């Protein structure tokens, strides 16, 4: 008697339900020209080569850059629907502690402001990379002797070697998970440019700082400057674009050091209180 064999059960998905999809190559959802993530509308040539709307506007003669076929304004509705449907994408900073699961169209904006974006250790010879929180803990554990401690909203003093100290790391003592850097740039105009920035995953810094330089006999004269703090994910090579004080070399003519009094404010003050 002939045996009957049941066919393997096919995976059935309700039209109103959802199905998990694993992409072997996530680049298929990126524009092959600019490598940025696709966002609707997505255009294609007659042979199916896709481009994002930004690159579509830059293509000359309406010809596909891959096979020279006409692109016209044919939209790939299937890819657009797929992009809108993908709801569970991990952040690229997952290895640095981000656990957010995002819609595909939200992913790019989230990653630009992700608080777990990787930051680099400012000390030469150290290749540590991690979120600003991880970097702060790393610096406290490995380089604390290479930093100057301070507290928010309190003045602290520094004797800066104006010729040799390119920067100093300022370490706040209350586990705020942000490193601050005092920059010292010696210019060709016989001046030192001073500024403070922070190394942070966040693009926006909420702090302000005040630097006072004392000089003259018994430091009776003072030059004071106040500004907002800029944020970067690594040590800045140049002074920030915001204003900064220029200190003439004659102020440090005695021993080559600047007497600084610094205060870093935890939050920006309203303009009418400054």
Image (spheres, helix red, strand yellow):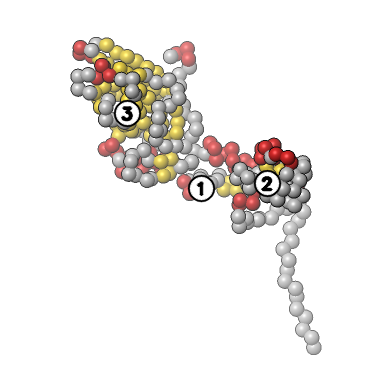
| Mark sitting on residue 106 | none
Q: Label 2 near label 1: C-beta < 8 Å?
A: no
Q: Label 2 near label 3: C-beta < 8 Å?
A: no
Relative to residue 70, is residue 221 depicted above or below? Answer: above
Report the residue marked by disc 2: 65
Which of the 4 image quarters holds residue 38? top right
45 and 267: which is toward the camera: 45
51 and 7: which is toward the camera: 51
Relative image position of residue 187 (x, y in whole percent): 34, 24
Q: Secondary structure at mark 3?
A: strand
Report the residue marked by disc 3: 150
- Neighbour tally class for label 3: few under 14, some 14-19, many 20 plus, Cα within 10 Å: some
Relative to residue 183, is residue 2 depicted above or below? Answer: below
Q: Label 1 near label 3: C-beta < 8 Å?
A: no
For image coordinates 59% across by 38% down, the residue present is 109
For image coordinates 68% across by 46% down, the residue present is 65
Report the residue marked by disc 1: 94
Q: In the shown orientation, is residue 87 left or right of residue 113?
A: right
Query: Of callouts 3 and 1, which one flags the residue occurring earlier in the amino acid sequence?
Result: 1
For image coordinates 64% across by 51% down, the residue present is 28
Query: Of callouts 1 and 2, which one flags the residue occurring earlier in the amino acid sequence?
Result: 2
């Amino acid at each position: 008697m002939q045996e009957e064999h049941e066919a393997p059960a096919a995976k059935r998905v309700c039209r109103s339900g959802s199905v998990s999809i694993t992409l072997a190559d996530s680049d298929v959802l990126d524009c092959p020209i600019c490598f940025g993530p696709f966002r609707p509308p997505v255009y294609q040539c007659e042979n199916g080569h896709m481009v994002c709307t930004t690159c579509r506007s830059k293509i000359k003669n309406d010809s596909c850059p891959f096979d020279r076929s006409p692109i016209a304004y044919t939209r790939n509705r299937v890819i657009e629907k797929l992009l809108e449907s993908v709801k569970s994408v991990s952040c690229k900073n997952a290895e640095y502690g981000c656990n957010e699961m995002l819609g595909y169209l939200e992913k790019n904006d989230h990653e630009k402001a992700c608080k777990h974006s990787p930051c680099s250790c400012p000390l030469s010879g150290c290749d540590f990379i991690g979120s600003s929180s991880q970097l702060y803990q790393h610096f406290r554990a490995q380089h604390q002797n290479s930093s100057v401690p301070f507290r928010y909203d309190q003045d602290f003093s520094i004797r800066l070697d104006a010729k040799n100290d390119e920067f100093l790391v300022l370490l706040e003592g209350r586990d705020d998970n942000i490193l601050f850097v005092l920059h010292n740039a010696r210019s060709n105009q016989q001046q030192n440019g001073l500024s403070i920035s922070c190394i942070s995953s966040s693009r926006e810094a909420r702090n302000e700082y005040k630097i006072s330089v004392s000089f003259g006999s018994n430091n009776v004269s003072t030059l004071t400057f106040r500004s907002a703090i800029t944020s970067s994910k690594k040590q800045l090579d140049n002074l920030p674009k915001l204003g900064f004080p220029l200190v003439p070399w004659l102020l440090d003519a005695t021993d080559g050091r600047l007497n600084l009094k610094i205060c870093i404010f935890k939050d920006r003050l309203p303009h009418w209180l400054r």
